[in-house]
Amino acid sequence: MRIFQDELTKDALASKRVEVAVVSFDSEAQVVQDFISADRFAPPTLTAQGLTHMGSGIHKALDLIQARKVQYRANGISYYRPWVFLITAGAPQGESDGVVERATQRIKDDEDNKRVVFFAVGVESADMARLSNIVVRAPLKLLGLNFAEMFVWLSTSMQKVSQSKLDEQVALPPPGWGKI
């Protein structure tokens, strides 16, 4: 995530326009970093531990985005469609199937109504079949532990979006760090 922050801050416009928030989900879903501009983002150190409350993490992230949009609208601020970038090494576990099913439906509704763009990345032993049942877009499997290249791609993509007009379609570079 340090690479992501370093790359974003190389672009003056992106460092001011892109906001980052981090939600972790292990045996508990929690906001590790509330929304902050890229130039003020201090990447946290995250470790895999406990269970994988993925459904709760998805709900927490989407709630955080929804609250941020309310703040923007209340202040008359236009915004780009938020991106959610879920990274997991497992599959949902330790929470009810209903929580995961509601998260799955919420992703679908939010994507269909253009409220978010939701990406999913599986690393190491991630259950890609299960992940593909949760998200709308085909999840990508990280090649090895190529996090650096993934975060450079994410930063480059965010820079392109931040330089576009609101609601403009932006061609993203191919993700050479992952495969479907």
Image (cartoon, helix red, strand yellow):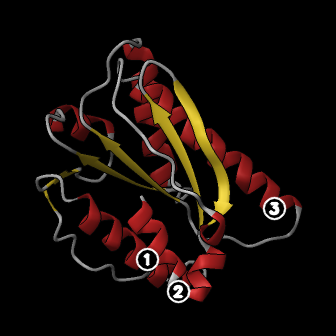
Judging depth in this view, the residue of 170 and 41 nearest the camera is 41
- Expressed as whole percent of the image width and height from the top left, the position of residue 117 reads 45, 59
- Expressed as whole percent of the image width and height from the top left, the position of residue 151 reads 34, 65
Q: Are marks 1 and 3 in contact (CB under 8 Å)?
A: no
Judging depth in this view, the residue of 97 and 37 nearest the camera is 37
Q: Is residue 173 above or below residue 48?
A: below
**Residue occupying the point 62% across, 72% down:** 39
Q: Which mark is residue 73?
A: 3
Judging depth in this view, the residue of 119 and 33 nearest the camera is 33
Q: Amino acid at mark 2?
A: Asp
**Residue occupying the point 45% across, 44% down:** 45
Q: Secondary structure at mark 2?
A: loop
Which residue is disc 2 drawn over? 11
Q: Amino acid at mark 3?
A: Arg
Q: Are marks 2 and 1 in contact (CB under 8 Å)?
A: yes
Q: Is residue 163 left or right of residue 68?
A: left
Q: Amino acid at mark 1?
A: Glu
Which residue is disc 1 drawn over? 7
Q: Quadrant of the C terminus?
A: bottom left
How far apart are the two marked residues, 2 and 3, measured between alpha carbons? 26 Å
Q: Secondary structure at mark 3?
A: helix
Q: Is residue 156 above or below residue 41?
A: below
